[in-house]
Amino acid sequence: MASVSLKNVRKNYGAADIIKGVDIEIADGEFCVFVGPSGCGKSTLLRMIAGLEDISGGTLSIGDRVVNDLPPKDRSIAMVFQSYAIFPHMTVRENLAFGLTIANAPKAEKDAKVAEAARILQMEHLLERRPSQLSGGQRQRVAIGRAIVRKPGVFLFDEPLSNLDAALRVDMRMELAKLHADLKATMVYVTHDQVEAMTLADKIVVLNAGIVQQVGTPLELYHRPANKFVAGFIGSPKMNFLEVTVEAVDGGSMRLSGPALQGLTLPASDNRAGDKLTLGVRPHDLTAMNDGPLSGTVILVEHLGNETLVSLSLTNGQGIIVALDGDTNCHVGQTLTLGFPPNKVHLFNEGGTRVIV
Amino acid sequence: MASKFTRSNATGWMMAGPAAALMALFIVLPFIFAIGFSFTNQRLISPNPTQFVGLSNYSQLLGVGLLVLEPEKDEAGSVLRTDDGSLTYPALRGFTRNNPDYPQFDGMREWFSLSLGENRIYVLARDVVFIKAIVNTVIFVMVVAPLQGGLALVLALLINQKLRGINFFRAVYFMPVVVSIVVVSLLWRFIYDGQSGLLNNLLGALTFGAFPRIDWLGNPNTALGAIIAMSIWQAVGFHMVIWLSGLQTISPSLYEAAAIEGASPWQTFRYVTWPGLRNTAVLVLIVITMQAFALFAQIDVMTSGGPLDSTQTIVFQAVERGYGKQDISGGSTISVILFVFVLAISLLQRWLTREKK
Ligand SMILES: Nc1ncnc2c1ncn2[C@@H]1O[C@H](COP(=O)(O)OP(=O)(O)OP(=O)(O)O)[C@@H](O)[C@H]1O
Ligand SMILES: [Mg+2]
């Protein structure tokens, strides 16, 4: 068991800055997920924690030790790779016991620890097989088992489920959640799949271009995104953004309008008349409303059963997405008028930062 | 799919035709001829018609015998000694020249002899030169295969790193492979020169003149060793490249997994690298063995089989008999013997290095 703390951690390859000063505190026993678009540096950051990449600047502590210069094996971590990285010529048992074999552990200890890991992951019947005789999900289970045998303070996962098919991914996701509940170990998990992030995490770290955008619980990120990037990244389908201008501020309220927006009154922020803002509203917060401030023409209808996703082209030609009831009757070419509750609106200033309403 | 193959069969054969015809003409046909000739007394140019001689070419080349001679005794049965106390034995030629009691030894010569108690054991061969050629070739193969394969692997491991200028070293090690073996042999004749050769000068300089000058290629004790050393050097780069390609098929994440488990460099080699190189090892071993059995150019350029037949080899003998002595049947027989040898050893190696279930 161990906490992880990153203070102003940096990484550069030559002149290329990849991680640009990152501060993250991960508490003991917490399930922390790094999300971000491809190439934002999630894997690099995780590999720095593992000790597979060296740290160009800042301090990394695991437990109460600074581990910047410790080799991976001394950091009390275990890592599960996207490509499984299990040894193809060894049986499952040998793979699980690899670290103990390396350390010359007695056979009884090996057998006991392997048996325990196999029991936790329910794969006792697979122990004598070779990786080539396993399915993708079973292989990833072996990789997780090898991590469990290490009894690390911190588990590191780099997109462990992205090579699995959709159904298996859902199963494994639940198993990982259960594993975390059972082991109560600290876990750091990298993914670009925000559903995985939302379902698994105690704490999500959203990264973009090597910078932490926001740290928070899944619901904090969903309901109060700190900036436009997080707002757009968390939630599916994506949040809709509309350009608006503050027309007038009047006591406790302000009036907004924009090219696609007829006119909207919201509680006042500290903005002044003339300020340009971005208004964000999630597809699920939009409803058909005869006197709503938005209207557009339907260009695509997707029936998903539990909901219907409708793409509209607004009066100024901008596209937005609306999530409506599962059995909404709606056809292409139809005109829809939409509205939303004022407390579901997100406002961002020109720099993209959230505006407090 | 199958129907397409049958339909385009004619086109396929037309395209493969020229190459297939050439291969048949220059590889398959001579091979069949060689097998045929080995059962005849065919000569390159001869006024007499060719006759079928059965296996006599083979028994002529491979015939060996064992003769145990007791020391000469006087009438009383006590052994005779010369003035300096050594035993005397009957003359060997008495057994191998027209002795009706020992028809099996007729025409044989001494290959080597040793003493066992008072008795003297002679190992006789019908064709001593060819037997020496076989022994030399086998020694050459047994020394070159492990040393060249091992050295190539070490070089490949050293070169398989991300270092500045590593391509320079790759090129340097590969260079001797590109140079013609005849040119290399000529150059090494200078290096091995008995008077002012580079090797003698180097050894002399390193030992301040204490090392005696050796005529490396003119001394029966050093000639084969000198050729072995030079042959290893010449082709090691080729096998290094094969090992390198094998190394690059091993997934880097396996190395990272091993690092996290705390494997030492040797353990990493043993548990990750070597098992991943299994197929490459079989390939390298078989290729080296086949190349080593075909040892010819170095001998032809550097020693012509001498001194005292200490560097005779199977292929050199085949060429010398077939063309030097115009004994086509003898040369063919040697080729067939070589073929059987190489085939047997390749099969054995494949069996020894097979993947155990
Ligand atoms: N050895 C390297 N040299 C230079 N740049 C590198 C190196 N390794 C990674 N990068 C760069 O670092 C950035 C971050 O890479 P990283 O693998 O951490 O991305 P990621 O967030 O894990 O993306 P993905 O979701 O695609 O896995 C990328 O832009 C990549 O090009
Ligand atoms: Mg990645």
Image (cartoon, coloured by chain):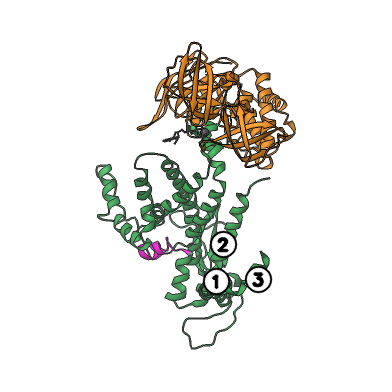
Label 1 sits on residue: B16
Hey, what amino acid is under mark 2? Phe
> For the residues marked 1 and 2, what is the alpha-carbon distance in whole angstroms?
31 Å
Q: What's the colour of chain A in the image?
A: orange
Hey, what amino acid is under mark 3? Thr
- Crowdedness near tag 1: few (<14), some (14–19) or many (≥20) residues, C-alpha within 10 Å: few
Q: Is residue B285 visible?
A: yes
Q: Chain of mark 1?
A: B
Hey, what amino acid is under mark 1? Ala
Task: Tell which tag, 3 or 1, sits nearer the viewer.
Answer: 3
Query: Within 8 Å: ligand 1 and the Cβ of disc 2?
Result: no
**A5 or A269, which lies in front?**
A269
Q: Chain of mark 3?
A: B
Q: What's the colour of chain B in the image?
A: green
Instruction: Please give the name of the residue rendered at 66% of the width and 64% of the height, measured from the top-left corner.
Output: B1
Q: Is residue B298 magenta?
A: yes
Label 3 sits on residue: B6
Q: Do the residues indicated by labels 3 and 2 lie within the same chain of the protein?
A: yes
The image shows residue B4, relative to residue A280, as above or below, that is below
- Looking at the picture, how far across and down is residue A161, in whole percent? 62, 33
